[in-house]
Amino acid sequence: MRESYRVAVVGATGAVGNTMLQLLAERSFPVASLKLLASHRSAGEILTFKNDPIVVEELTHDSFADVDVVFSSAGASVSREFMPTAVDKGALVIDNTSAFRMDQDTPLVVPEVNMDVARTHNGLIANPNCSTIQMMVALKPIYDAVGIKRIVVSTYQSVSGKSGRAVLELVQQTTEALEGKPITLDKFPHQMAFNVAFDWPFLDSGDNEEEVKMINETRKILNDDTIGVSATTVRVPVFFAHSESVNLETHKKLTAAETREILNNAPGVKLMDNPSNQEYPLAVDVAGKDEVYVGRIREDASIENGLNLWVVADNLRKGAALNAIQIAENLL
């Protein structure tokens, strides 16, 4: 084991990239040197890491000659083009895009759930989708205890999951809506301010891409193709943190009290479930936190062995940057 590592962050100027820099510093990740990479449009920008200014470099195939670990979050097409080069040059790549998630030979990893498969990597490990990550952290302890037959999940996803610019556009749209001005549409297909919308491309099946990701990634992470998964993903006018309503049908009966006990001792989970005192996870409270918060745990009497949970997590931290860093910390 080395004492420190030469690190590169691809997509450093994006929302996830910025969160990555923050967490690398917060968690004292053993950084010997740090290279910040982005497109030619962002090259030359200056970012700060531990109070030191670092100039962003343009991403090329020559960027990885002196790099040990790559955290990539610049989009699937960029990862497909450049990450194989990074692997060929000896770097460990943890990719936060959809490019390699469903590749048979690429581990898809949530450290609290299936860290063991990460050790079978061939130089590249995939970070799951943000919505899948938080759901898996909450459900794996239940899966281990009684098994899961079916999952029905509806998401309420913040705009930061789209991009940092989407956050700014929501601010702009909110002002325009309050002032009665025409609504600017750039990052969103519909007005996002004071609205809920479907914000991902639709497939011939009627599902959107985000829903299919949650279905396929859940089965791969749990290594269980027998689980039925039905997902509906929705964008809401919230800046940070995704919320999910999760309905489960388990193989064996689990009471709400038993579920709380299981989750109260689960890694990465923060139980917040006291509705009588208005205590349950809210996006505004969870934003900036590292844990996956779970509340509103109750039995669903409409089906045998049914449970309902409310799951909230910061999509830029645990849903992206933190999960990737935790993988590296466990491996290195």
Image: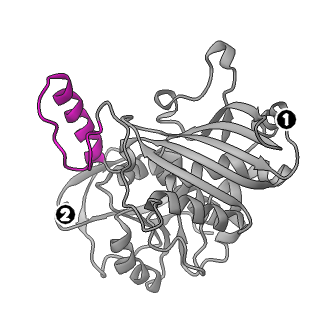
Asked if 217 appears above or below 50 in the picture, the reply is below
Front-most of 279 and 57?
279
Asked if 271 appears above or below 162 in the picture, the reply is above
Asked if 72 appears above or below 195 in the picture, the reply is below
Point out residue 127 in the picture as x, y percentages from the top left corner: 53, 62
Q: Quadrant of the C terminus?
A: bottom right
Count all numbered tags in the image, as a single digit. Answer: 2
What is the three-letter code of the residue carrying label 2? Ala
- Residue located beneath label 2 in the image: 43
Relative to residue 281, is residue 203 drawn left or right? left
Residue visible at 88% across and 49% down in the picture:
252
- Specify the segment rendered in magenta: 164-192
Residue visible at 45% across and 86% down in the picture:
88
Residue visible at 65% across and 68% down in the picture:
220
Magenta-colored stretch includes residue 170: yes
Front-most of 43 and 193?
193
Q: Counting other residues with Cα less than 10 Å from the Cα at mark 1, is it few (<14), some (14-19), or many (20 or more)? A: some
Q: Quadrant of the N terminus?
A: bottom right
- Residue located beneath label 1 in the image: 255
Residue at the right extreme of this rendering? 252
Mark 2–mark 1 Cα distance, whole angstroms, equals: 54 Å
Point out residue 270 in the picture as x, y percentages from the top left corner: 66, 35
Point out residue 193 in the picture as x, y percentages from the top left corner: 28, 33
